[in-house]
Image: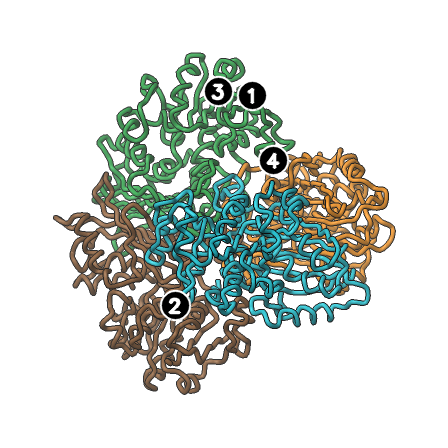
Chain colours: A green, B orange, C cyan, D brown
């Protein structure tokens, strides 16, 4: 059994890791840490888990964590993981970081969007954990920068098309919509039921920190810098994320080629579902799952390409993809622990 | 492998049976029927199941169903199951009916609340499928009347106390609240998002058909007729049911005795969680699970007993309990297929 | 024009006062205060009010407030109003306090539920502002303890029946349900969208501070102490409150007498709607209004009386009733400013 | 007093007309019709209106309607209004149609999107009721084609910029999001709480019937054909609509010019609020109001223009704008009946 530790187990992504890993056939969750709830049983914080998860949260002592784990998931606000990863890696642990700290190759881009990076040496070897796109590198990695939720939902439909030069990269626009759990478990006016329910709004237009993350990955695939227009919105629901992506077809490219490209690319990847042509994605169809549902349309009036993707922001957009990456790193089947049957409603 | 058929697979309870049974280690789902969607792939109706459930819905031909099943779940509106159960039983099938048709021993009570009963002969042998309370009879049964959602949530806390004569049965009041999925998948003004969201209402006050069902079961346990006051309400959420039950303690009975009675009664039953005394149930803690969470309080001002239970109306209140009953009938572990880890949010 | 000041204008009850008073034909809102947002335009906090309300929030300086107001609404957490009311009253202001500080006649009951009372001298003259029940006293009052939301929804149906001795006061149970805005605008896990939506729960069972408030008022009406069993629940919606009240009819009392009693009592009171006998209350029918909808049923199985009331917790349960009380105190028509037409959805 | 009739008063747009007109100082609502509810009191269908609206719904007899009205609002599915308008106009009534029947100048475009038009003769004189943009024509009109909700939210920000040639019309993309009330009151799976809540989806991508409506109006303003890419989405809320619009600035145009253009254009129009530059629109800020909130941003990475607008789909997107148009036609102040103060939550 692989021994897994979760640093930051009581945030939503951390708790989702607990849920998924607790059913994984090859993993034993040996450590849960929480700054806020050290000493508190996990099921006192998430009472749904009463009788299901019996572990008590503990302080984050890296040394003691190293003794009891093979793989460590860091589900913390950015800045903290980069202070821990060097020691964990040095002790031979595999590290999957769900923050932004190891997503960038370009430290300057990270620092422009976030803050000074204190573990730049690791950026060279860290691998961007978009499982379907960077699988070979992930399999060999010691350190994963697990993608942001928005980037996951935008890159999965776009990466193959950019790689195949089927779209004009100067035309890319991603209009994205997220459920409230994306804002985390911290209490704030932004997550207050009365401020959020029966409400729909845009936020951080053109200035969201996931924008440079998407740009960097697309640029790497394209071979030259790419800038996407990215506008996130908040949806009055708990889980779910949809990205509607607009692109101009490359000259001489066709809708049929786009569909074929995506079909071929994702044929070996069970978690990306190119849904039947007469259907459109709905976030509730991926709720609680690691699926990414994708549909493709061509606007009849303008010929513009429209790509629509749906994920669960906490699963394929965070904890699920993290476990998928661990599966790839540890030689498990990539679906282990991730095939919980979805709910009909 | 036990071969299971689901008659009425595309309503919410039926689809939930599909979800649960598709992960059951000892069951092979061999038949899904749907009047409305015969010939349609199940995943066209529930797109979440794309790539997960690959069966096509078919018409309900009892003969052909009998050839391919060992157990049949009927998830249909009442009246239909009583027209099918005799033939299914005669062909040696075990039948678990999720409608009201086989819940009553007293045909007159059924007919007063519903309509003329056409299979009265089977009422003598049918067993009320409240798994924890009637386990021995369920294990030997050929035909189960699976309890209503409200009765399940009300009887689980009350049955042991009535059996132990710890409460005055003349004092019983159940104020119950259900999510909208309890109204089924049929489109109506009652389930219209704009009529239901940001709304809370009582309905069928004192005249709900689950009232005589509860009365009959409590009366059987008590040994004399019992009448409970039962008021259902509609909550603007999809899944979940809570019952707040008021009772006067029997003379000389104490809160401590009530707690001990419930603790002893449910010790062997993993799906009933008597939650820690400092917590109260929340429907989200049982969402998607077969758990029933129960708390007990005594009102300091009046000494009145307050019992609070939470279930997922589609799981412990319908499909989950039906599978639990099948497990008991077939000699499986009662938790098989029913331990999907709950979601933290 | 009556000059009105609102101390604590940026909480939900305060903001609702701003909304209502801004359309009142006889009132000029001259002061808005906010500890948190002093110096900030009101419409920066509530952007819906852009172009509608142009006032800037200020610090709470009682002296300066007295110069510019005739009536002062205090919409603050309890404890603060009792530190301000004496000075306001001494300066000839009429004070309507939306906290609990002036709701109790019995200081000991207040102190048992809240904390030491520092303005006990005013309790003798303060009037409990349940507009329909204490209208004569309200008209003459200088200081109003505006009722809690739960007490309003429970006392309106019960007060006339207790006064007429049509119900057995030892039998009273109120199962109440509130939208999330009742918890106020403060950010907390309790109001976090992801913790509250798709959730229904009971809280403070038997120990809510509105319990002694209800008991005191019922006791005053009854002439002897009354203890009601009161269980509040949280509904996943923003606004709205429903109370389902159970009572045993007094000997020789009938359902018809109960209906007649309520009809007669509320005939002169436009905000209490005894809805047609074939309907039941729904919180959405009173959303944004000062109405209290009431229905009466008798449980056929037990003869028990069931009273159901619906209010908007922020209007009739707080700001609306406060303005109604001001109308009575100032000699306005009691509906002035309070007849905004309800929304169909 | 102007006598107003509402044909189709019990759908959501019709009921919203009833709400708004019932507070209009210069209007007397004399007729409410309903196919489904003829003979039923309006408040039995919308119980919120109990004691507020006392009229009974009647059958649609045009002759009798003409006798008692000066202005007629038709809030019906398309196809029906074009069968009524000729007779109403011939009898000297002013007609404001909320369907698509009189929105198009180009009958062929209507017929391609809808069905054969049976009152083409009236298309020449009917005026597109986008109040702020076509005010002079509206003031003189006998027949108004009241705009669709999506077109209203998209045209208000775009019309001035297209007119001023500040944006490249080949670049236009509108990613729009609507609450569920836009689907009307008809019960369907699409509006079923359990299918819609906790769900976000795109629908009718590139094939929505509001697309040609937008194209025609933009084309008329631009002087040449315009095709916009338009993708609608469904938001799990009752009311509210947001459009996020992407456009490339015309050569030599600047963000400052765009802002100035909109500021100048809407200076005389109180219902369009160009919100402060540090804020972004939120549908809840316009809920229940006739406001359209607009913000402008320029994406720093690409220079692309992002326009964001929020309306209440039932008010500015339907009934509110219809009343605004009536105000213009009848010489009332355009805000009469439309200044109900918004709710803080």
Q: CA distance from mark 2 to mark 4?
A: 46 Å
Q: CA distance from mark 1 to mark 4?
A: 20 Å
> Residue B50: where, in percent of width, then height?
49, 44
Instruction: List the residue tagged with mark 3.
Output: A71
Instruction: List the residue tagged with mark 2.
Output: D319
Instruction: List the residue tagged with mark 4.
Output: A47
Residue that lies at the very extreme toward the front in this rendered image: C90
Marks 1 and 4 belong to one chain: yes
Dot 1 lies on which element? strand
D190 vs C167, left or right, is left
> Residue C189: where, in percent of width, then height?
52, 39
Question: In percent of the image, x 76 and y 45: which residue is there?
Answer: B303
Q: Nearer the viewer, mark 2 or mark 3?
A: 2
Dot 2 lies on which element? helix
In front of the other: B297 or B110: B297
Q: Residues within 10 Å of mark 1 (few under 14, many from 20)?
A: some
Closer to the N terminus: mark 1 or mark 4?
A: 1
Asked whether the residues under the numbered discs 3 and 4 touch, taking CB atoms below 8 Å apart as contact, a structural biologist would say no
C233 vs D150, left or right, is right
Residue that lies at the very extreme toward the left in this rendered image: D252
């Amino acid at each position: 059994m692989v021994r897994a530790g979760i640093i930051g187990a009581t945030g939503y992504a951390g708790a989702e890791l607990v849920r998924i890993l607790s059913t994984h056939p090859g993993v034993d969750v040996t450590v849960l840490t929480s700054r806020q709830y050290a000493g508190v049983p996990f099921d006192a914080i998430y009472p749904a888990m009463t009788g299901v998860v019996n572990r008590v949260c503990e302080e984050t002592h890296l040394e003691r964590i190293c003794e009891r784990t093979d793989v460590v998931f860091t589900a913390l606000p950015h800045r903290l993981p980069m202070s821990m990863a060097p020691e964990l890696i040095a002790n031979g642990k595999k590290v999957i970081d769900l923050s932004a700290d190891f997503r960038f190759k370009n430290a300057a881009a990270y620092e422009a969007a976030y803050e000074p990076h204190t573990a730049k040496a690791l950026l060279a070897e860290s691998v961007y954990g978009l499982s379907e796109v960077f699988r070979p590198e992930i399999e060999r990695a010691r350190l994963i920068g697990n993608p942001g939720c928005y980037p996951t939902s935008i890159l999965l439909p776009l990466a193959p098309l950019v790689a195949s030069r089927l779209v004009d990269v100067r035309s890319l626009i991603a209009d994205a919509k997220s459920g409230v759990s994306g804002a985390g478990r911290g209490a704030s006016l932004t997550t207050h039921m009365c401020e959020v329910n029966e409400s729909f709004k845009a936020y951080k237009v053109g200035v969201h920190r996931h924008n440079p993350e998407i740009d960097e990955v697309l640029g790497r695939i394209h071979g030259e810098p790419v800038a996407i227009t990215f506008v996130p919105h908040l949806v009055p629901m708990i889980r779910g994320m949809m990205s509607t992506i607009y692109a101009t077809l490359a000259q001489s490219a066709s809708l049929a080629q786009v569909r074929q490209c995506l079909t071929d690319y994702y044929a070996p990847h069970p978690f990306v579902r190119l849904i039947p042509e007469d259907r459109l994605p709905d976030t509730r169809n991926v709720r609680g799952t690691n699926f990414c549902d994708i549909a493709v349309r061509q606007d009849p009036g303008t010929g513009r390409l429209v790509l629509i993707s749906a994920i669960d922001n906490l699963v394929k957009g965070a904890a699920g993809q993290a476990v998928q990456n661990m599966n790839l790193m540890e030689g498990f089947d990539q679906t282990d622990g991730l095939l919980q049957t979805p709910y009909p409603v």
